[in-house]
Structures are given as structure tokens and as C-alpha cells.
Amino acid sequence: MGGLQAPGVPGSAADVPWRPSAVGPPHEDPRGPPCGFGRIVICAVSSVRVVAPPELPAASDPSWKRREAARTKSRSYSGCGKKGGVGVAVPKPPQSTVRSSRPVVPAVSRRRLSEVLHSVKGPSRRLTYAHATSSLSEVCKRHRRAVLSRAANRAPLSEGRQALADCLRGDPGCHSADPDTLRSEAESLPGIKAIRRAATPCFLTTRSGECSRLGANPETGNPRDHLHEGEFWPFRMRPSNDLRGGQFQTCALVSNGPLVKIARNRQAIDSHESVWRFNLMSAGPKQGAFAGTKTTMRMFNRLRGIQAMETRAGRGLATKEHGAEQWLFWNSASAAYITDLKRRYPNVPMSLLHSNLLTWIVNVYFKLRSDIAGLGLHNFSCPDNISSGIHSLLMSLQVCKSVNLFGFSYSQEVLRTRPGHMDETHSMYAGHSWALDATMIRLLHLSGLVNVCTADDPSIDLKDLRSGRIGATHL
């Protein structure tokens, strides 16, 4: 296993760090295996030598598709090291190709998107191809300048804080650190305290009461700004009830990122009370063996919501077998088409996240960014928007008593190699700060707020992994 120990499940009676004694699921633990379900191998941090969190390079060159195709043929894989989790040397992988933030719609052609936009009536026509710098990016740039000015006068870190900083940079810093010390130092950070004290009054924009008001948020503004004059999001199309704090006992957040295809975690994921997915990620028979078939929450960004309007993927997600899904939209601009989307899929509950929740998410995001910068890790890009995964993760920490993550990037090395990705090309949108997201996930894991559930296995052949032919000996 890697050098980092898996934390106890938040909210459990025995809320103490869990320490594995050997590679493999620790069935001798009285609380059961990590995450509480099924046969899962926990390797919360990859055992590779990473000395600093580098910035992912942006690929503004129009030849990114050719370089992306070439890169996928020469990927190297690194997972939990053998010999008891000691860091193993791996071939240096090529740099990840990150999409330029222009065009804003890399997943579909401009012609195809034009067909989608013009196939619907009303406010959806107002969406354009232009990608304007978001207000969040400007806020982040001011925040980063302030952080850098404070860093020049920062006092030396204490021994415990230095251990936490080293562990956030990579596994070598975790090997000699005491898990209790790491957790104590992480819990003392203002961002972690803000999460534990959270009491957001509204999660969703509902049809009545205080939570029915459309308000502005610091990330994407007010939904009213994206509606034509005289247009309104009908109350009858909104959910009647809001979510409650701590409503779900166990939540699995399933991303389509690295490591999700390495083990068949269907039983483990589907055993959770609530399963969250993102955008158009499928949970069909092909993907279900690895990532489960159950979905209760699905978080959309603006573009994927548009694509759900017309694409085959959107129609598939809205079928009767997916009727239990609730679709959530974090971008206020989604107000421009949510009415059309609801008319197209009347049986699917849909709602915009409430401005109260979005404001809290942005505030906590920058608190965590400040915490990480205070530990000496501040070389991160400023995002245009916070990713759907981080929106869902921070939201789930309020509505779920236990949060387990599958398929999330949790180290810089995983970001660069990205093994076991659900998508064949697995290119990355440059408008998010992926390196910071991975560091935040490491910090949340060390604090005990989440469990990072993976099945790293360096013995799996990458050719079989990419083709889906994984031998039974690895399952």
C-alpha cells in the first residue's frame, strides 16, 4: 500500500485512523473494509516519487488532437508500489495534454453544437460560442497575488505543518509521517473547520419558501441574468423539497477519471445509499462492471446540460431505468435552457443549486486554497470555474454523513499518467485547476472528511486495461 493511511469513516463510532497491515482488503478490521462495502483495495495516494505539484501545461497548439492520440499510445502506469508500499521507480510519462480553454466546446464540433442550439426554442438560443473570462478567475488572480505577498513574510512551518505539506506534495513525504499528526494538523486548518461548521440554509432552488428565490453567487452570477426579459423559470418545474443536511448515510461520488476502470467496483459503489455522477457519464452495462449502475444525483456543467438536450447520451440518461436520478446544475447560465430540458424530459427531477450553497462552495474553495498556499504549495493556476467534481464533493460533505470517492485524481502523478480512464482520449479541460483539485482531495482525505477508494494494481497490463480485457486474476 502507499505511505498514507486511510482515515476512519467520518461520523463513525470509532472515528480513528484505519491502519492497513498488508496489501489487500483488511477484513480483520472490526469496522469492515475501507468505505464499508465490498472488496476494495484502498490506496489513497499513489506510490510514486513526486517532489512538487507542477502546473499542467496548456495546449493552445491546434495540433493537440494529434499529440493527444500519440500520448495515449505511450502512457506508462504507476500505482501502489510493491514491497509493502515503498515508492517504486517508473518510466517518466509524457506530459498530459490539456485542452486550451478555447474553444469552450471541445467535445463536439461547432457545427454539431450549432445544430443542438438551433434545435431548441427560447432562451437556449442565447448561448454563444464566446468564452469570456469568468469573475471567479479575476477573484482568484487577486487572491493569488495576496497569497504570494504574504508568503514572503511567512514564518517557518512547525514540524507538524511541514509534515502535512510534504505529504500533500507526494508519497515520499507521507512514508515517515504519523497519520494522527497529519490528521490533527489538517483538521486545524481554517478551510477544514469551515466545512465541519457548515450549515447552509438552502441547497437547491425549490418551488416555494425561502429557497425559491433566485439570488446571485460569486461564481456565475444570478440565473435571472441569463433569461430573456419576461421569461421565468416556472415554479411547477422546480423540486418541491430541498435536501437536508446529513440526509444520506453513505455517498459514493464516481468520477470518470483515473483508476476507475482498474477494478470491478460495481457492488461496492451500488451499495451506497446515494451515488453521484457527473455530466454525461454513462452507467450502462459496459461501464457498470467497473463504476456501478446506480445513480441518484447527477451534476451538470453548462455545456453538458446543453448536450443532454439532444445527444443520445442525454436521451439514454432520461429513460425509465434512470428515473430515480436527480439532475443538478451548478452554473447559473443553465437557467437559459433548464425549462426546455425539463419539457423534454418531464420525468427527471431537475434543479439549479441555490445561491446560498454556491456562495459557500466558493468561500470554502478559496479557504482551502489559502490553507494549501500557507503550507508552501501555491503554484496553481486560476480556474475559470470550479469543476463539477469539486462542486459535488463540497456539497456532499453537507448532505452526506460518509463520503467515498471513486475515480478521482488524488496526486500529480495520477494527473499526468491518468491510467484506467473511462474515456479513451481522456483529455482535460484547461479551464479548471486540476492540480489544485487533486491537492484538495489529498487534504480532505488526510483530514478524515472523505475516503479515497481506488484499486491501484501495477501488475495490470495497460493494453488490457485500455481495451477492457482485464483478466479474472485481477478482479
Image (cartoon, rainbow, N blue to C red):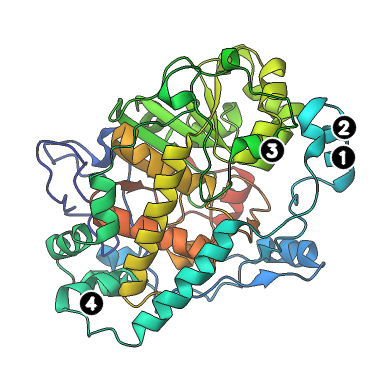
- Kindly indicate the quadrant of the structure image that contains residue 120: top right
Quarter where residue 316 is shown: top right
Who is closer to the viewer here, 81 or 150? 150
Image disc number at residue 114: 1
What amino acid type should be assigned to the residue bearing mark 1?
Ser
Mark 2 and mark 3 residues within 8 Å of each other at the beta carbon = no
- Kindly report which numbered mark, 2 or 4, lies closer to the viewer in this rendering: 2
**Relative to 23, does residue 197 appear above or below in the rendering?**
above
Mark 4 or mark 3: which is in front?
3
**Residue receiving disc 4:** 162
Label 3 near label 4: C-beta < 8 Å? no
- Whole-angstrom CA distance, mark 2 to mark 4, is 55 Å
Residue holding disc 3: 226
Residue 431 x/y as whole percent? 62, 59
**Is label 1 or label 4 in front?**
1
Residue named by callout 2: 118
